[in-house]
């Protein structure tokens, strides 16, 4: 019985917050208006919008299906040797997996009732998953966690958990998903402007707002655990975090934009690039910028890389 209610940690506090905020239901949204709006999108606009939605639909399913080993790995750690209470974190993840299932539920319903398809494949071709670092990788991450649990080696397990949290919460949630929300914001805003309306796809916007709120908690919890693991094994920053961050920077932040042309006139990819660079800095600051050798200051590191290319 390691939980002390009077000594609630970050994960417990986020769990309590989630009990209050995470109670929304995807079934509550009326999609009639969204269906009518969707018919006003051109074929190119629909295809571009569906590319991002398909990444989310697949991604939410992937995160739902691959989170359970994180709980098992935490449970296999010697709690008394760790700087945080692994049981409180397990409680947090129990809530998160339910929320991810609900996000999958939302996209599943929306695809059926508004997009009138369940097929994401045609919209994902040539997409980001071919540039590395996609939610497909989470299945390997989960396998590696299971192997580390079997090894019985504490350092190996902490390292595997650190890599898993970095991939899942540090990159996929904090970078890729949040970049996706910014894409939605721009596409919807530009489409509304073009149609002379204040808002289009109103229910989508509202429901995505709830998903974002859930994800903000997931990201904060993830950053906190990454920091705790760095406290437990300081070398994890140089051995695990920095190489994975570097890979993301190479594949995404320094890569050419995926689409040369945008059907939504005025779409600004550079603006999104700047915002996601700041998100990465926020994660690094949370873990502790002075623990990092090369990425303590993300913008300076990016400049250096660009000058070297
Ligand atoms: Fe999610
Ligand atoms: Fe999430």
Image (cartoon, rainbow, N blue to C red):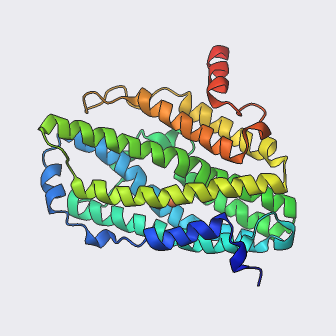
Q: Specify the quadrant that holds the N terminus.
A: bottom right
Q: Tell me what residue is drawn at x 77 percent, y 37 percent.
A: 290
How many numbered discs, if any? 0
In-image side of 120 versus 143 (left or right): left
Q: Tell me what residue is drawn at x 35 percent, y 56 percent.
A: 208
Give the farthest residue toward the bottom.
1
Nearer to me, 25 or 143:
25
In-image side of 308 versus 95 (left or right): right
Residue 44 against residue 67 in the figure, above or below: above
Residue 242 against residue 17 in the figure, above or below: above
x and y percentages locating residue 292 in the rendered image: 76, 37
Residue 71 visible from this viewpoint: no
x and y percentages locating residue 27 in the rendered image: 28, 72
Nearer to me, 93 or 2:
2
In-image side of 120 versus 162 (left or right): left
Residue 113 sits in quarter: bottom left
Q: Tell me what residue is drawn at x 29 percent, y 39 percent.
A: 187
x and y percentages locating residue 62 in the rendered image: 51, 61
Residue 208 visible from this viewpoint: yes
In-image side of 2 versus 245 (left or right): right
Residue 57 against residue 289 in the figure, above or below: below
Q: Specify the quadrant that holds the C terminus.
A: top right
x and y percentages locating residue 237 in the rendered image: 78, 44
Q: Tell me what residue is drawn at x 75 percent, y 70 percent.
A: 85
């Amino acid at each position: 019985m390691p939980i002390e209610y009077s000594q609630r940690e970050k994960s417990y506090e986020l769990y309590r917050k989630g009990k209050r905020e995470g109670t929304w239901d995807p079934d509550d949204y009326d999609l009639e208006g969204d269906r009518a709006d969707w018919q006003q999108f051109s074929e190119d606009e629909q295809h571009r919008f569906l590319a991002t939605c398909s990444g989310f639909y697949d991604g939410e399913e992937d995160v739902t299906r691959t989170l359970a080993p994180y709980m098992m790995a935490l449970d296999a750690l010697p709690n008394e040797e760790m700087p945080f209470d692994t049981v409180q974190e397990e409680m947090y993840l129990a809530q998160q997996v339910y929320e991810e299932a609900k996000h999958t539920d939302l996209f599943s319903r929306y695809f059926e009732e508004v997009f009138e398809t369940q097929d994401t494949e045609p919209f994902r071709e040539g997409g980001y998953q071919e540039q590395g670092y996609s939610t497909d990788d989470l299945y390997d991450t989960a396998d590696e966690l299971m192997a580390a649990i079997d090894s019985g080696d504490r350092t190996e397990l902490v390292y595997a958990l650190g890599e898993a949290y970095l991939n899942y919460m540090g990159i996929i949630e904090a970078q890729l998903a949040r970049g996706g929300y910014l894409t939605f914001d721009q596409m919807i805003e530009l489409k509304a402007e073009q149609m002379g309306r204040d808002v289009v796809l109103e229910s989508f916007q509202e429901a995505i707002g709830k998903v974002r709120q859930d994800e903000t908690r997931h990201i904060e919890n993830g950053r906190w655990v990454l920091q705790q693991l760095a406290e437990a094994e300081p070398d994890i920053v140089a051995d695990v975090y920095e190489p994975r961050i570097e890979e993301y920077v190479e594949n995404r932040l320094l890569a050419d934009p995926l689409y040369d042309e945008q059907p939504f006139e005025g779409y600004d990819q550079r603006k999104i690039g700047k915002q996601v660079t700041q998100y990465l800095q926020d994660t690094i600051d949370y873990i502790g910028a002075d623990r990092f050798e090369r990425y303590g200051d993300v913008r300076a590191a990016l400049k250096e890389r660009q000058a070297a290319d």
